[in-house]
Image (cartoon, rainbow, N blue to C red):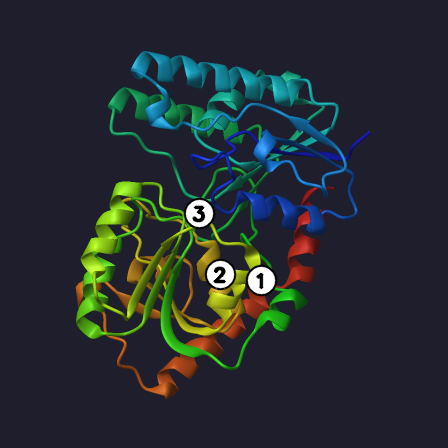
């Protein structure tokens, strides 16, 4: 019998049915951190991997709005998702179940399960953002009640940011950990350029970013999967003959990703903080592992306690910095990295929590 089930019921994919976001990597890294446990992975088909010795395939439950014709069909989708989560919890042969990627549904599912049915279960969740809030007052009231009730049934919530507050027991576990892999990937020969990597969605202010770099003539590389192909083509028209900017619509492999990141002086995260508030970023964390200076909204850097070049508005951003200040940023981030992102410390914290 397995010791623990690791569950990703959302299974985010792109239009080609390929995994998107950081969960694919999180699954792999949790597997290494839990190498003393026997793990059963419960994932959708695109997330199945060779290292998974025991795996159960489920249908992806992600809420992609364009899949549903109206609010009623979306409502029934959410009901089916909650019923699936109840089934996964109650029918699991493993005593410990860990939901590593969640939305509001897990709180609704736990809220309706009577506590006595969970006596033989230990439920763990990973939380990447704070409270789920809704504009609709009725929906928000329901969620707040469910959120409060569900946490009474959660043994531990692993939070990816120290600022996330929960009513249940919480332990800070960053998205990624620092180990020898990153030491080998570090490069001392960094090019004087800025890279923008990852999924290119509506969370990122790409038009403002491109217009800024047209003016400052600094080298900018934007590469990643564009969720909106029309937007990608419009950006190509904007940069036109500006040779300092290159844009690619492509999901790059790990080798190219780390090559680009580790050999660049800067990485920029042009998030729209009205959408991307109170969240962490895997790229931001890997930047400090590879001694790259992050450029990001002031709010994002502050929330993650990471040093970098901050801005309130992209148009005000200046890269005219003295080398001494850049070195200070890198040194401060190295201190942070060694204190909070150390592999052995994280592994110890997780394993102690799962006892």
Q: Residues within 10 Å of mark 3 (few under 14, many from 20)?
A: some
Is label 1 in contact with label 2 (beta carbons under 8 Å)?
Answer: yes
Q: Which element type, helix, strand or loop, lies under badge 3?
A: loop
Quadrant in which the C terminus is drawn: top right
- The image shows residue 22 at horizontal and vertical percentages of 51, 47
Q: CA distance from mark 1 to mark 2?
A: 9 Å
Q: Is residue 42 left or right of residue 135?
A: right
Answer above or below: position of 137 versus 319: above
Query: Mark 1 or mark 3: which comes first in sequence?
Result: 3
Query: Mark 1 or mark 2: which comes first in sequence?
Result: 2
Q: Residue at left 36%, top 17%?
A: 74
Tell me the residue that label 1 is attached to: 341
Query: Mark 3 or mark 2: which comes first in sequence?
Result: 3
- The image shows residue 73 at horizontal and vertical percentages of 36, 13
Viewer-nearest residue: 188 or 26: 188
Tag in front: 1 or 3: 1
Tell me the residue that label 2 is attached to: 285
Q: Which element type, helix, strand or loop, lies under badge 1?
A: loop
Q: Residue at left 43%, top 19%?
A: 78
Q: CA distance from mark 1 to mark 3?
A: 17 Å
The tally of labels here is 3
Residue 164, which numbered label? 3
Q: Residue at left 67%, top 45%?
A: 353
**Can residue 274 be seen from the camera position used here?**
no
- The image shows residue 119 at horizontal and vertical percentages of 69, 22
Q: Is residue 298 left or right of residue 123?
A: left
- The image shows residue 7 at horizontal and vertical percentages of 61, 33
Q: Which element type, helix, strand or loop, lies under badge 2?
A: helix
Q: Residues within 10 Å of mark 1 (few under 14, many from 20)?
A: many
């Amino acid at each position: 019998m397995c010791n623990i089930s690791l569950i990703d019921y959302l299974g985010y994919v792109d239009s080609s049915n390929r995994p998107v976001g950081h969960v694919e990597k999180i699954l792999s890294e949790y597997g290494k951190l839990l190498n003393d446990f026997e793990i059963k992975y419960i994932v959708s088909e695109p997330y199945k991997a060779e290292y998974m010795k025991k795996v159960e395939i489920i249908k992806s439950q992600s809420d992609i709005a364009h899949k549903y014709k109206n609010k009623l069909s979306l409502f029934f989708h959410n009901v089916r998702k909650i019923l699936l989560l109840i089934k996964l919890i109650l029918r699991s042969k493993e005593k410990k179940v860990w939901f590593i990627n969640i939305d509001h549904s897990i709180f609704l599912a736990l809220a309706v399960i009577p506590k006595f049915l969970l006596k033989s279960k230990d439920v763990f969740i990973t939380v990447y953002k704070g409270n789920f809030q809704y504009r609709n007052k009725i929906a928000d009231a329901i969620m707040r009640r469910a959120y409060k009730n569900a946490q009474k049934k959660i043994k531990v919530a692993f939070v990816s940011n120290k600022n996330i507050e929960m009513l249940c027991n919480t332990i800070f576990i960053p998205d990624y950990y620092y180990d020898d892999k990153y030491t080998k990937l570090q490069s001392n020969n960094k090019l004087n350029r800025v890279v923008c990597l990852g999924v290119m969605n509506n969370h990122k202010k790409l038009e403002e970013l491109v217009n800024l770099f047209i003016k400052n003539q600094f080298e900018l590389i934007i590469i990643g999967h564009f969720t909106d192909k029309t937007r990608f083509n419009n950006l190509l028209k904007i940069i036109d003959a500006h040779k300092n900017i290159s844009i690619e619509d492509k999901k790059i492999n790990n080798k190219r990703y780390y090559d680009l990141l580790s050999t660049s002086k800067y990485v920029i995260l042009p998030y729209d903080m009205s959408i991307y508030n109170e969240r962490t970023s895997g790229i931001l964390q890997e930047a400090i592992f590879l001694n790259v200076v992050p450029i990001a909204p002031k709010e994002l850097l502050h929330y993650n306690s990471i040093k970098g070049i901050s801005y309130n508005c992209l148009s005000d951003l200046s890269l005219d910095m003295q080398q001494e200040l850049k070195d200070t940023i890198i040194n401060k981030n190295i201190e942070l990295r060694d204190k909070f992102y150390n592999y052995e410390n994280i592994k110890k914290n997780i394993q102690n929590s799962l006892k």
